[in-house]
Image (spheres, rainbow, N blue to C red):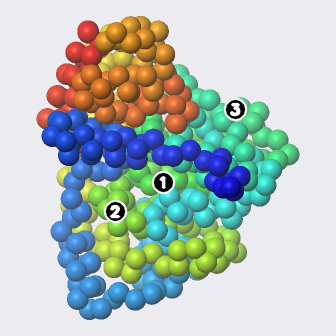
Amino acid sequence: MLSRRVRKISPSLTLGISAKVKRMQNEGIKVIGFGAGEPDFDTPLNIKEKAKEAIDKGFTKYTSSSGIKELKEAICAKFKKDNQLDYHPEEVVVSCGAKQAIFNAIFTLCEEGDEVILPSPYWLSYPEMIKLSGAKPVIIKTSPQNNFKITPFQLKRAITKRTKLLILNSPSNPTGMVYQKRELEEIAEVLSRYKLWCISDEIYEKLIYEGLKHISIASLGKEIKKRTLVVNGVSKTYAMTGWRIGYCAGPKEVIQVISNLQDHTTSNPTSISQMAALEAITGTQRDLKRMLKVFRKRRDYMVETINSLSLLKTLKPEGAFYCWVDISQVLGRQVNNKKIKNSLDFTESLLQAMYVAVVPGEPFGDEKYIRLSYATSLEDIREGLERIKKFLGV
């Protein structure tokens, strides 16, 4: 008999869709995939060269479970330069991806019966991690009228005696929306007043458009900083998803416990990947700038095309590389001889009929939406959207 803990969790739909697409492609079917949660660019050459150098020098042994000193110092310097945040190396732990960093943070802060406030739509792994810890997700529904961002009023209404923390994701996966300074100040004031924790997931920090500035909620005062765990990593920014390096910064006493947890789970992140991450953070940022320029062009084309279709609409994302697409006008209609009841129906029918893979909104908290990633070529975006247009008959 499996434990109750693992029976609570659901498989990752995004990873499942990616696996299905790969199987179809291996069978010779040309599938246009809009499901990817990773840049389609290669890891920059300077980063790969540092990894090769690490191998050649024999840097292939265990390191400290919480990461090498040089990388933690570089992360602290990055926080100072980019976010006006002062951290010391003992206030940073390097993990096997930002996903592990978030899991460790939730597991360290939450106990059985605690409540975690989660704005919806949310990254699909958050509620599963919360449930694994024994805590309960408390969902706050957001709307396009507020650019899918929670208000201080909504936050206050969701707080109970059991509330332990808020998970905040800016730029957001799946909406691409970015919290502005004033909005974060109001949220920080509520969290500080009720003595609640915040896990601030900032993994898409560098992927922001229109000259917007990323603000870390932890930078808005001493009180909120001591109640915040900031999570980031190199996966999205430097096209390093497979290298599995993320990190978490926060109060020393909490980081030490997270470090202890990591001691007995994974131990250290891969030594070679740590050296690659060190180069990513401290080396040239030329490739990032080029990638951002390409993403912006793809985003603009995708948004304009989607909004030209009478049955679909989307807000222009301010960051990340996703469009959160409203399909409510399609629901209840017959499409390709099948009645579309929710985004799962839409996704399955589209893949079967047109060989286009998108991600349903259900696991992100809303069955009236789908997520499209523009981390794929402009050529594929054009063809994929043309297939969607044909699928809808518009």
The reply, left or right, for residue 303 in relation to residue 151 is left
Q: In this view, does 29 lie above or below 329?
A: below
Report, in whole angstroms, how far the alpha carbon at label 2 lies from the one at label 1: 18 Å
Residue tagged by mark 3? 154
In the picture as drawn, the residue positioned furthest to the front comes out as 1
Q: Quadrant of residue 394?
A: top left
Evaluate if marks 3 and 2 touch, with contact meaning CB atoms under 8 Å apart. no
Judged left or right of residue 270, residue 160 is right
Sequence-wise, the earlier of marks 3 and 2 is 3
Q: Residue at 29%, 58% (x, y): give it.
A: 239
What's the residue at 22%, 54% (across, down)?
41
Work out how far the residue at label 3 is from the one at label 1, CA to CA, in angstroms: 22 Å
What residue type is disc 2 on? Answer: Gly
Against 265, residue 241 (above or below) is: above
Q: Mark 2 points at which residue?
A: 242
Q: Name the residue under label 1.
A: 202
**At 52% across and 63% down in the image, what residue appears?**
100
Mark 2 Cα-neighbour bin, 10 Å: few <14, some 14–19, many ≥20? few
